[in-house]
Image: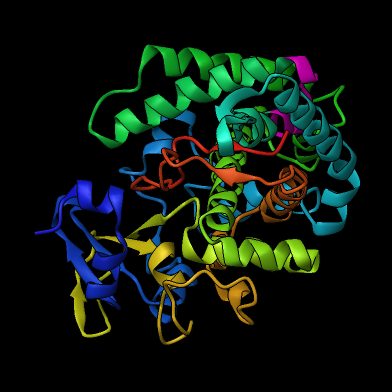
Amino acid sequence: MVTVEDLETDPHPTLAAIRPIGWIEPLNTWMVTSRALALTVLRDPDTFTVDDPRFSTAQVVGPSMLSLDGANHKSHRDPFESPFTLAETRRRFTTPVEQTVNELMAAARRNAGQTPGAAGAARPSADLRTTLAGPLSVAVVAYSLGLPPASAATVLDWYTAISASVSGVSAGHPVTAEGAAAFGELHKHVAAGIDSSDSLIAAAAHAGLGVDEVVANAAVLMFGGIETTEGMITNALWHLLTNPDQLDLVLADPSLLPNAMEESLRLEPAAAVVDRYATRDIELAGTQIRRGDMVTVSLAGAGRDPEVFESPDTYDVRRPNARRHLAFASGPHICLGMHLTRLETLTALEAALRLPGLRLADDSPPPRGLVFRKPSALRVSWDA
């Protein structure tokens, strides 16, 4: 029988074996793993809802666009739609993202360690997850919340405490005191800055949300902006560095880099699954789903559906339909910040690949995780 450890380490054989849908006993859920069936579930919030008392994030931060459906979801999400359009994202974020990436890469080179190279020659080395991907995602969230750059560490502290509390609730534990305190600090900051800040949060507040609603959605944006962006950057670099033939193609033709990013999202989306709850009895692909059952959509499984993607387990930077992945989900809950995280990831990849002779350390781990998947470290070295 499949175990949680199997799903955390390498879920893809299990996802392929149960496609299009199967029962995952350790998680007490139906797992949808085909692209077509995933779209059916994601685009039908009346039948497959997020609005359920079991939804852990809502227990910590309150109702938000992440945990509501129908008219309530629309009222929470609509004020953020305009600030997160492609054009507005580029206007607000291109310069700060480029500046932050340049600063982080300069620091990574300046503070690089040393690792033995050919013939004993030392090569500069660093962990690009902790020196580039993570700090960039935190800095951009701090900027979007209207915080000064020096407050990025504070945002990370809030995120860590709230995230741990949400994870605990998912495992059946009560909301932690640390999580509640961190959310209180976030609430205090956002409430104080609504009238004076030019942040995305302030823009949403001015569009009609109340303070509590703005804060809950700010917490959701903090989750998505940090966890999934860090994973997206790290996974993309890992795929390129573990497929040197594909890396050579991108280095020879940089116009392939955006598609290389999309191909990484297809193979290993940073958020691997999203949960829904059946509101009525229904049949999916011949499987009887009962009202109240959890139905988990595997975005990772949908990305490797052989009916859609030829040689689905192969990383191919020239794959013509790579963008048909569902890494950002679909339907009313499609990722609000997908333009921003693409901007961050592409900027980070371009900068990292300018390191000459960039290569992955032999002991650098592969992606891992049940819900969020990424390498725990991305240890690299480059030519001096």
Q: Main secondary structure of the magenta part?
A: helix
| Among the 4 quarters of the image, the one containing residue 280 | bottom left
Count numbered badges in the picture: 0
Seen in the picture, residue 114 relative to 181 is either above or below; the reply is below
Colour scheme used in the picture?
A: rainbow
Q: Quadrant of the N terminus?
A: bottom left
Question: What residue appears at the point 55 percent right and 15 percent down from the top-left corner?
Answer: 184
Q: Position of residue 195 (x, y in %)?
A: 84, 24
Seen in the picture, residue 121 relative to 31 is either above or below; the reply is above
Q: Quadrant of the C terminus?
A: top right
User: In the displayed image of the protein, which residue is found farthest to the left?
Assistant: 1
Q: Is residue 327 magenta?
A: no
Question: What residue appears at the point 60 percent right and 78 percent down from the top-left corner?
Answer: 319
Q: Position of residue 367 (x, y in %)?
A: 42, 48
Q: Position of residue 372 (x, y in %)?
A: 43, 45
**Residue 187, visible in the rendered structure:** no
| Among the 4 quarters of the image, the one containing residue 64 | top right
Seen in the picture, residue 76 relative to 176 is either above or below; the reply is below
Seen in the picture, residue 202 relative to 292 is either above or below; the reply is above
Q: What's the magenta region? A: 139-150
Question: What residue appears at the point 37 percent right and 64 percent down from the top-left corner?
Answer: 297
Q: Is residue 100 left or right of residue 221?
A: right
Identify which residue, 238 or 8, lies in the foreground: 238
Q: Position of residue 133 (x, y in %)?
A: 63, 37
Question: What residue appears at the point 84 percent right and 42 percent down from the top-left corner?
Answer: 93
Identify which residue, 195 or 159, lies in the foreground: 159
Q: Is residue 177 left or right of residue 62?
A: left
Q: Is residue 209 left or right of residue 300?
A: right
